């Protein structure tokens, strides 16, 4: 087949300044979960910080919603190779929550409804790098995407942004979470293609 010059359509090559290597762009929002979607009663919802802390802290839904929220736009990158640009979220910075916590811990293990866990260095949750989000594109976060609350850590692969998150355990030593135990990379930097153990 012969195509006339200029008849090939627009290039779909992603911007290498915004899209990590090995990723493709999507305008959809794929749903990937390790188990069934929990349906959470907000009256029963709590979020806790526990582990290596002087005093464990638990927020109820209303206490959490009374915290200052911010709306921001970020790019997100899934280990299954899709990236989605300019996603807008509303949530509470982890800086706000962890500002009330006294700890010498260096690692965090986020835990969720359904038993899912994922581990992160505590430094990756601070300094404006992570949020607990309750809105996506100015609408309440749908349960399929982790609502009512999910962790959002956009500088790491999306499996680190735990859906249906219920709390964080702080530890002196790193402990692998669910996917990390099954061979995913312990850290998950999309710009270094840290998909699996050994990458």
Image (spheres, rainbow, N blue to C red):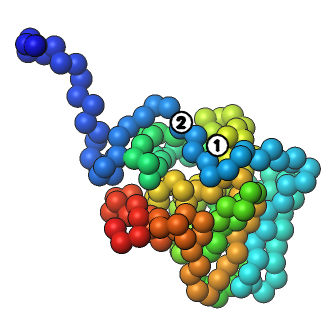
Q: Element type at marker 2? A: loop
Cα gap from disc 1 to disc 2, whole angstroms: 9 Å
Q: Quadrant of the C terminus?
A: bottom left
Question: Which circle marks residue 89 in the picture?
Answer: none
Q: For this view, does 137 lie left or right of residue 4?
A: right
Q: Looking at this view, is 120 or 31 the one in front? A: 31
Q: Is residue 138 above or below residue 9?
A: below
Q: What residue is at 18 percent from the left and 18 percent from the top?
A: 8
In percent of width and height, residue 194 lies at: 38, 64
Q: Is residue 189 visible?
A: no
Badge 2, how many Cα within 10 Å: few under 14, some, many 20+? Answer: few
* Circles 1 and 2 in contact, beta carbons < 8 Å: yes
In percent of width and height, residue 36 lies at: 71, 46
Q: For this view, does 107 lie left or right of residue 91?
A: left
In percent of width and height, residue 122 lies at: 57, 75
Q: Is residue 151 visible?
A: yes
Q: Is residue 177 above or below residue 161?
A: below
Residue pushed farthest right?
A: 43
| Residue 39 in which image quadrant | top right
Look at mark 1 in the image and give the residue it sits on.
Answer: 145
Q: Looking at this view, is 123 or 160 the one in front? A: 160
Question: Which circle marks residue 29 in the picture?
Answer: 2
Q: Looking at this view, is 128 or 32 the one in front? A: 32
Q: Element type at marker 1? A: helix
In percent of width and height, residue 95 lies at: 64, 67
Q: Quadrant of the N terminus?
A: top left
- Name the N-terminal-most of marks 1 and 2: 2
């Amino acid at each position: 087949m012969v195509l006339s010059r200029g008849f090939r359509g627009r290039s779909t090559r992603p911007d290498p300044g915004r899209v990590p290597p090995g990723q493709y762009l999507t305008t959809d929002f794929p749903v990937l979960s390790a188990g069934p979607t929990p349906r959470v009663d907000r009256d029963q919802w709590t979020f806790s910080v526990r582990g290596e802390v002087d005093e464990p802290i638990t927020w109820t839904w209303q206490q959490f919603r009374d915290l200052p929220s911010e709306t921001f736009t970020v790019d997100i990158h899934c280990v299954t190779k899709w990236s989605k640009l300019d996603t807008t979220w509303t949530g509470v910075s982890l800086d706000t929550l962890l500002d009330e916590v006294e700890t010498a811990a260096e690692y965090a293990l986020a835990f969720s409804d359904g038993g899912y866990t994922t581990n992160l260095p505590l430094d990756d949750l601070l300094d404006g790098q992570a949020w607990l989000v309750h809105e996506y594109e100015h609408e309440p976060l749908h349960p399929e995407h982790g609502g009512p609350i999910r962790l959002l850590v956009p500088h790491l692969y999306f499996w680190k942004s735990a859906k249906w998150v219920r709390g964080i355990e702080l530890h002196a030593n790193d402990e692998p979470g669910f996917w990390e135990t099954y061979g995913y990379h312990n850290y998950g930097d999309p710009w270094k293609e840290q998909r699996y153990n050994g990458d």
